[in-house]
Image: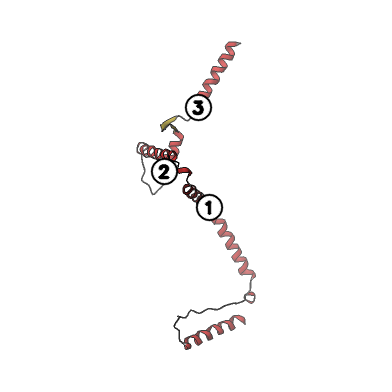
Amino acid sequence: MKKLVLLFLVWLGCGVNAFSQSDPVLLRVNGEVVTRSEFEYSFHKNNSMAMLEKKTPEEFLDLYIDYKLKVSAARSAGMDTTQSFKEELASYRRFLAKSYLTDTAAEEEQARKLYDDMKNSVSVSQVQVMHIFKYLPQNASAAAIRNASSKMDSIYRLLRN
């Protein structure tokens, strides 16, 4: 019975060990572990951007280590706790959230539907003209003002009838 329990514990230990090795540690930067999946995710994310030149994993590794060292140095210096950093981070978060949470296609469709509904339901007699403006330069003559005024009055009379 003891052998069976011991065998079970060894088997369980091997299973846990095998499970923990599914994402091996690729490197350590300032004591911080970087797993293979984390590195691959960053590599593919940065290589998928069309505006950047493609890098090999070896070339990207140097850049990634520099990035991790800079992040570590910034955290050590307390830069991640300053008010300006928090405000900038919140600004980025709002900007990104807006692009993910706003469905522009649905908004456009709703606006188009509302426009079409109003176009079909509102007749010309329901529109009330409040103001009619005509641009005139500041130094307009009295004759130009009278001419513009008569044009605006005639437009108003046409719309009212």
Residue type (three-letter) at the residue carrying disc 2: Asn
State the residue lying farthest toward the bottom. Answer: 143
CA gap between label 2 and label 1 equals 22 Å
Question: Are the residues tagged 2 and 1 within 8 Å (C-beta)?
Answer: no
Which of the image's four quarters has the C terminus?
Answer: bottom right
Residue 11 percent across, percent down from the top left: 54, 19
Is 81 on the left-hand or right-hand side of 6?
left
CA gap between label 2 and label 3 equals 27 Å
Q: Residue 20, labelled with which disc?
A: 3
Marked residue nearer the N-terminal end (2 or 1)? 2
Q: Residue 98, labelled with which disc?
A: 1
Q: Name the residue under label 2.
A: 46
Residue at 53% in and 52% down: 98
Neighbourhood count class around disc 2 (C-alpha, 10 Å): few under 14, some 14–19, many 20 upward:
some
Residue type (three-letter) at the residue carrying disc 3: Ser
CA gap between label 1 and label 3 equals 37 Å
Question: Are the residues tagged 2 and 3 within 8 Å (C-beta)?
Answer: no
Residue at 45% in and 86% down: 141
Which of the image's four quarters has the N terminus?
Answer: top right
